Image (cartoon, helix red, strand yellow):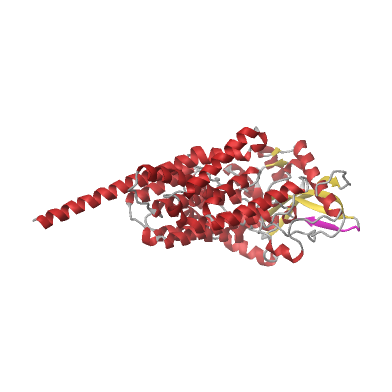
Amino acid sequence: MKSTASQAQGAVGEGARCMFSEMWTLAVVAGALLSYRFLISPLVKLTSSRAAMPIGGFVGVVVIWLVLAVVLHLEGAVDTLDDFRLVIMVATTAVTWKTVTADWNFSERRRPQVIYRLGLLFLLVLSLIDLPVAVLWLMWLVSAGKPWVHHSMLAIRLVKMYAAVAIPLFVVHLFVPNYVEQASPLLLLFAGVALSHYVKPAFSKIALGRRPWSWVVENQPYALAASAYMWGWRRLPERLTVPLLTMSARLSIPLNAAALVVELLPLISGFSPWTLGVSLGICAFFNIVVVVLSGIFFWENILCLGALSVTAFLLADQWAPSWWMAISFGALLLLSSVHLTWKPWDLGWWDTPFAVRMIWTVSTEDGGTFELHNDFLDPYERDYGRHYGYFLCDERICTFHLGGVFNSALRDAIFESAGAPRKIEAIKKTYGASQRDDEQTDSHDRFMIDLFTGLNAGSRRGPLAGLCRVLKAPGGQLFYRGDLPPYRGGKTVAEVAVRYRETYFDVNEGTFTTITDHLVHRTPIMARSDDHR
C-alpha cells in the first residue's frame, strides 16, 4: 500500500513539475513576442535612423545593444539558444555576403562604405565564434539604414527573434532557478518567424476574389512565367518557351491549389519536429519553383529555411509533444498575418500576361549600344529589376512588377483585350495613373552620372574584380537578358537612354506582341568635379 501511495505521489509530483515547466515556458514565449514587438523592433528602427538622432540618444541606443549582448552571455540564455546556432549563423552569413560583395554606390563616398562593410564582416566573424555577438552584428547592419529589402527580411527577423528570446529567458532563470529550458517552444518561435512569410501570402490570395477559392480557380500562373520571360528571364528559346507556357495554362488550377496548400501547410505543422521540418523544407523547395517560373530568387529564404529544417530534425529528441504548443504555433502564424507581431509581405495578386517594363541602354563613345541590366546596377539590383523607372515617363501605369494586379475587373479587361493596342490604351485610361516624378528623375540622373563618370575614369565597379566576381552574392531579380548585348564595362559610356515597352503574350495564339516601345528619357554622361571614389 505504501508503494502504491508513493507511486501516486510521484506521479502527482511529476505532473506538477510538468505543469510548472509548461507555465514558465509559455511565459518565455509570450515574453519573447512582447520583447520582439515592443523592444527589439523599435530599437532597430531607432538605430536605422541614427542620422537624425542626437549623439546622446545614439549612445544610449548602443548601450542597450551592448546590454542585450551581455544578457545573451548569461546562464539560461546562452546554453538554450546555442541550439539555434546554425540558424543564426546562416542568416547572418547570407546577409553579410550580400552586403559585403555588393557593388559600390558611386553616389556616396567610398570610405564610409568600406568601413561599414569591414565592420559588418568583422562582427560576423566574431559572431561565428561567439554567437551572442550576432546582436551587435544586427546593430551595425541596420545602423546604415540600408538592409531593409524584401529578400533579406526573413533572415534579419530571425536574428531579431534571437535577441528577443534572450530577455525572457534571463528573467525566468533569474526568478525561477528550478526552471528547465525546453527547446521545442523556442524552435516554434523561430519557425514561426520564417513560415509566417508564407502563411500571410496565402491569406492575401484567399482575400483577393469574391470567394475564398476564387484565386485558385481564376488565376493564370502561366501569365507570371510569360511576363518574366518578357522581362528578361529567358531560360529557353521562344520556340521552346511557348509550348511550355501553353501546356502550363491547362494546369492553372492544380498549380494554384498546390501553391496555396504549401503556404497554408505551416498552420498544422507544429505537432512534431518531423512535420515542422518537412514544412520548412517544402517552403524552401517552393522558393526554388518560384525562381524557375518567375526569375525571382529568394535565396536567403532558401538557406534560412534549410537551416531551420535541419535544426528541427536535430532537436527531435528534445521535442516535448504538446497540443497547446501546436495550437499556439498556429495562433502565432495567424497573429503575424494581421501584423500584430511582425509584418510579412502580402504577396497576393492576379497574374496577367501584360508586361510593362523600362529598359535601360547605354551608348558608348565608339558607337556601340548595349542593354543595361539590373545586375550591373547593383547595389540597386532589385529596384531596377522591378517597376523602378515609371517616374521617367508620362504613361499611365495599370500593373506592377511582372504584370500583377489587385483588381479582378482590371485583370479581366487585360485578358479580354488580347493585347489589342486600342483596348490596352482604353484600359490604361480607366485603371492607370501616371507616376511621373521630377525629384526621382533627378535622383536617377545623378546616380547614372556618378556611376559612369567613375567607371569611365577607371574606377572598379565593386570590391570584387576579375575572376573574383564569381564570389559575389546572387541577385534577387534575375532579369539579365534582352534584345541587345549586355553592357559589362570596359567601354566609355557617353549616354544612358531609357525606353518604355509594353508586351503581351496571347496564349491562344502562342505569340509575344510588342504593343509599344519608345524612348522616354536620356541622361548624358559628363565629367563631374566631385570625387566619389
Q: Which residues are magenta?
A: 366-372
Q: Is residue 121 left or right of residue 73?
A: right
Q: Is residue 80 magenta?
A: no
Q: Quadrant of the N terminus?
A: bottom left
- Residue at screen point 72% across, 51% down: 114
Task: Give the residue displayed 63% in from the left and 43% down from the top.
Answer: 143
Question: How many numbered discs sit on the rendered protein?
Answer: 0
**Horizontal arrangement in the rendering, residue 186 relative to residue 494 (left or right):** left
Q: Position of residue 347 (x, y in %)?
A: 56, 47
Q: Which of the pair 183/280 is nearer the observer?
A: 183
Q: Nearer the viewer, residue 77 or 478?
A: 77
Q: Position of residue 331 (x, y in %)?
A: 41, 45
Depth check: 172 or 193 in front? 172
- Residue furthest left as drawn: 1
Q: Residue at x 47, y 39 (%)?
A: 340
From the viewer's side, name the closer residue of 166 and 27. Answer: 166
**Horizontal arrangement in the rendering, residue 408 relative to residue 308 (left or right):** right
In the rendered image, is residue 356 in sight?
no
| Residue 471 visible in the picture | yes
Task: Give coordinates of residue 254: x percent, y percent.
Answer: 50, 59
- The residue drawn where x is 61% and y is 37% is 59
Q: Position of residue 188 (x, y in %)?
A: 42, 52
Farthest residue, direction right: 366
